[in-house]
Image (spheres, rainbow, N blue to C red):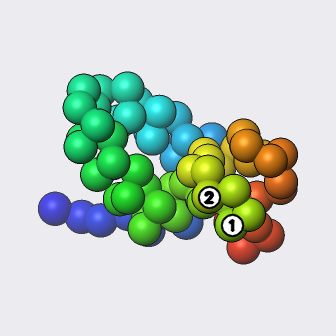
Amino acid sequence: MTTVDPMTIDAKTRTALMVLLLSQATTSQEKNAVTRAALRARFMWRCQPCKADNHLTATCSGCHARRPLGLA
């Protein structure tokens, strides 16, 4: 099995992947596990001021902060 570097996949594709995975998670435990994996893989980002989890193509949903510059 080959692995793909997550940084070679564009942000819109990564966001679409995370939306698909989160929509298939049925329990809160599954959603938390998918979110943790997405944060570690840098497919999502967590806003430091309000601690909201966000997709790469979005500004913060809670406080409208911009995503960090290091995320593509």
Residue 56, given in percent of the width and then of the height, sits at 65, 50
* Structural crowding at the residue carrying mark 2, measured as other residues with C-alpha within 10 Å and reported as few (<14), some (14–19) or many (≥20): few
Residue for badge 2: 51
Asked if marks 1 and 2 touch (Cβ < 8 Å), the reply is yes
Asked if residue 45 lies left or right of residue 41, the reply is right
Residue at the front extreme? 50
What residue is shown at x 72% (from left), y 73% (from top)?
Answer: 70
Q: Secondary structure at mark 1?
A: loop
Residue 6, given in percent of the width and then of the height, sits at 47, 63
Which quarter of the picture shows residue 38? bottom left
Q: Amino acid at mark 2?
A: Lys
Q: Amino acid at mark 1?
A: Gln
Residue for badge 1: 48
Asked if residue 65 lies left or right of residue 20, the reply is right
What number is the disc on residue 20? none
Image quadrant where one finds the N terminus = bottom left
